[in-house]
Each structure stands twice: as structure tokens, then as C-alpha cells.
Image (tube, grey):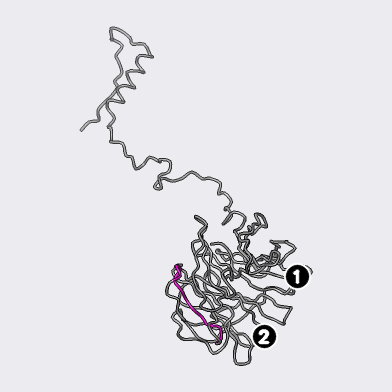
Amino acid sequence: MPKRRIFTRRSEASRFHLPVGLLLVVLAVGLCLLLPVSPLDLSTINVPGDDSSTPLPTRTPAPLPTKLHIGRIIFTCTRGDFNQLCWINADGTGDQQLTNVEAHNYYPVFSPKGGSIVYASNQNGGAFDLFLFVFDGARLIRLTNFIGNVISPSFSPDGGRILFANRAGEGPTSLWTIDNNGENADLLYAGPNTIVGADWSPSGETIAFAMADDTGAYQIFLMNADGSQVRQLTRGLPGIGGSVDWSPDGRFLLIHAGPEGDKNIFRVDVQAQTAAQLTEGGNNASASYSPDGQWIAFNSLRNNDQADIFIMRPDGTGIRQVTSNPEPDWQPQWEP
């Protein structure tokens, strides 16, 4: 089939001549009429915000901080004749006293999603009970009612139960649990010796606690969350104190140990059963991981025996002072 001739040369015998400009217009219109027209394919068009499009190269912005001011820390603060609760931003700003009662308040911890704290207080009489403070509406809920002397509360990962150490009667301090509304207080584990600190693992499957061994020295033990299969974790580390804190990934435990008046923070590898010393001097205690695992808060007497809150990196570097009140600040815990 012969090719179609679109344009032909006019002969010299033509009776008239078209202007050149008009001829070019006619040629353009003819091309438009003869070329095939296809439907518009929307898939080939890059729409702003459409993930299927190929984005133009852009400069990658610097990552934002995980939290404003690195995060916030709640802690026990001695103010006058009583131990109160305070909090502060981890960069040292926003120091604020939360309680102001003629009673002692200890061991503050945040609920897993924030919005409330639980702590031990003797504000209703000589014995220490657990209290839950809900920030929304400033509601204070008493969780235990003279069931002994309670210390070291720790929320389960889902926030439904609270683990705590309790001395009921004349026996040694044991581990108990209670619902977050104050119901169903139950004895979980009555060890042979006194327990001074405990923490629920991030997975919810394991509980770590500090308990005296047969020599009277404290060691770290692990057990299943139902109170079964108790096993000793640390051996030969002298002078272990009464605080335990899991890393967010469940690999490590923070403890303090050493001679009286010269305690240091140690990071215990749970699987390898080894301990790495993170601080050197200063009489340090009560170490606590930040929610992202990038910082550790602890209290220290390194400034002329003044108890202040410090933070450091997980390997012990980058130590920064957070509080500087002339009265003692201790037992820091991070807000989720």
C-alpha cells in the first residue's frame, strides 16, 4: 500500500499563491487532524503526595529529638522535713514540686502510657501504702489499705497490674501484685529472705528483684511473672542495692553495687550473665533507662555529698547534671 502523501508541491501552473504564514498554519492543522489521539493515562502523572510518583530529590532534614527536653523525670525530693515528689525536664528545665503534704512519699513511677503515677506514701498513717495519682482531674486514689509496708512499685507492661514489695506482719518483705484500681491484692512470691526492689520486664514475662541470699548480701534474682521458676542471676558482685530497672529491649538490667558509701551503677547482661560498670566514684544509685534506651538517669553524691539527679549515655559516657537543689533529689524514673 503506497504511503499517504500529506503535502504535495504545487505546480507552477497554479492560479494563485498562498502566503507563507498561512501555509504554515494549514500544515500545523493538518498534522493535528491526522495524528492518532490516545486516552489520557493518569498513572503517568506525578501528583503531589501520591506515593506512586517518583519524588524529586530533596535535602533530608536532620532528625528531630525523640522528645522535647530529652524527656521528663519524676523523682523523690526531700523538701524540709518530708520527702515529696518532684519532676523536671531531663535537660534541667521545668523543675516542679508535685506534692506538698506532711508525710513521706517515695518510689514514684509512671504508668506505661503516662497520665498517672503510683508511689508509696504514709500520708494516711504510719504504714506505707500505694497511691495512684491521675493527672487528668488531679485524682488521688488509694490502692492499698494497711496491708503492710509497701515499697518499689512497678507496672505491668499493659498497665493492668502493679508489682510491689510488701512486708506484711513479721515475715520478710515479699512480692505482691494488685490491680491498677486497688482490687485483688495478692501475694505473688514469699521468698526465704527480704526483697528490697523489683521491676517487671518489658515483655511482661519476667520479674527481676533484689533479695538477700543466705549470707545476708543482696543478689539479683529472676522469676516468671506468675511467681514460678526463681533463679539467681548475679554472683560475686558485692554490695548490691535495692533498685532494679530493665532496659526497654529487655536485654539489660541496671543495678548499683559496691562498698557502703561508694556505690556504682552496673549494667547486667541478662543472657550472658555479665556486669559492666558504668560509673566511677560518686556513690551512685537508683539508675533508670529512658523510654528510648538512649539515656540513663541516676542519683549521685558526687558533688560534695549533695544528692542530685544526673543522666548519662547507656555506656556511661556523657554524664550531665540535671538537678541542683540544695536538698536531696533521688529515685529518678522517666516519663514514657
Q: Is residue 126 above or below residue 323?
A: below
| Local secondary structure at mark 1 | strand
Task: Say left or right for 275 vs 166.
Answer: right
- Left or right: where 227 falls relative to 241: left
Report the front residue among 142 and 14.
Answer: 142
Residue 160 falls inside the magenta stretch: no
> Along the line of sight, which residue is nearer the eye, 313 or 238?
238
Q: What residue is shown with label 1? A: 302
- Earlier residue among tags 1 and 2: 2
Residue 143 as seen in the image, left or right of residue 2: right
Instruction: Give the magenta part as a residue range.
Output: 171-182
- Residue 173 at x, y = what percent? 56, 83
Residue sitting nearer the eye, 40 or 21? 40
Q: CA distance from mark 1 to mark 2?
A: 21 Å
Q: Residue furthest left?
A: 1
For residue 85, the mark is: none
Residue at figure coordinates x 20%, y 33% from the top left: 1
Mark 2, Cα crowd under 10 Å, few <14 / some 14-19 / many 20+, is: some
Element type where label 2 sits in the image: loop
Identity of the amino acid at label 1?
Arg
Residue 73 place in picture, x, y as percent:
61, 62
Type of amino acid under label 2: Pro
Q: How many numbered discs sit on the rendered protein?
A: 2
Q: Specify whether 279 is left or right of 112.
A: right
Q: Residue at x 44, y 67 (%)?
A: 181
Vertical comparison of 320 with 275: above or below? above
State the residue lying farthest toward the bottom: 214
Residue on which disc 2 sits: 238
Residue found at the far top of this picture: 15
Q: Residue furthest right?
A: 304
